[in-house]
Image (cartoon, rainbow, N blue to C red):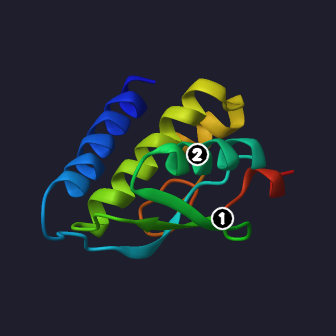
Amino acid sequence: MFFFAWELIKATMAVAWEIITPGSTIEQGIIGIDVLGASDTLVTLVANFITLTPGTLTVEVVRHPTRLYIHVLHLRDVEAVRADVQRLEALAIRAFGSPEAIALLEGGIPSRDGVPGADRNLEEQP
């Protein structure tokens, strides 16, 4: 929860600064971010946390493979945004996920491209 609160404070300050200063430094964009998709509930939780953060908005959720499309108002580093979303997802899974989801997060299921469980979905597991 501390991570989300800190990100919320930083984003609020960035958007407020953009409003009160002349000129524009907005570099917006939409990026797609793969998430583990441990459950619909966890994906919804992460998508809502993103939307609650000023300057970001979850535009679309694709279920198979699980991917979030996010509009970012201050898009300076795509990889940093991906890392933040993946960290937020990891925190949500550790807090609310099932033992299987936590195992998926911790690398208990083989992966694609170095992301634990990125090519699998827990709902498809036997």
Out of 83 and 9, give the one closest to the viewer: 9
Out of 80 and 73, give the one closest to the viewer: 73
Q: Please tell me whether residue 55 is drawn above or below residue 34 in the rendered image.
A: above
Q: Please tell me whether residue 109 is drawn above or below residue 26 in the rendered image.
A: above
The x and y percentages for residue 54 are 41, 49
Residue 101 appears in which quarter of the rendering? top right
The x and y percentages for residue 47 are 60, 51
Out of 54 and 91, give the one closest to the viewer: 54
Report whether 103 appears left or right of 63.
Answer: left
Report whether 53 appears left or right of 43.
Answer: left
Secondary element type, mark 1: loop
> Residue 57 — which label?
none
Q: Earlier in the sequence, mark 2 or mark 1?
A: 2
Secondary element type, mark 2: helix
Residue designated by label 2:
46
Report whether 47 appears left or right of 55.
Answer: right
Spatial CA distance of label 2 from label 1 is 12 Å
Q: Which residue is drawn at 61% across and 46% down?
A: 48
Residue designated by label 1:
66
The x and y percentages for residue 90 are 49, 39
Residue found at the very far left of the displayed protein: 22
Q: Residue at x 35, y 65 (%)?
A: 73
Report whether 41 appears left or right of 86.
Answer: right
Q: Residue at x 56, y 58 (%)?
A: 35
The nearer-to-camera label among 2 and 1 is 2
Q: Residue 108: tell me if it is visible.
A: no
Q: Residue at x 14, y 57 (%)?
A: 21
**Crowd band around label 1 with a 10 angstrom C-alpha radius: few (<14), some (14–19), many (20+):** many
Q: Please tell me whether residue 44 is drawn above or below residue 1 in the rendered image.
A: below
Residue 117 appears in which quarter of the rendering? bottom right
Q: What residue type is labelled 1?
A: Thr
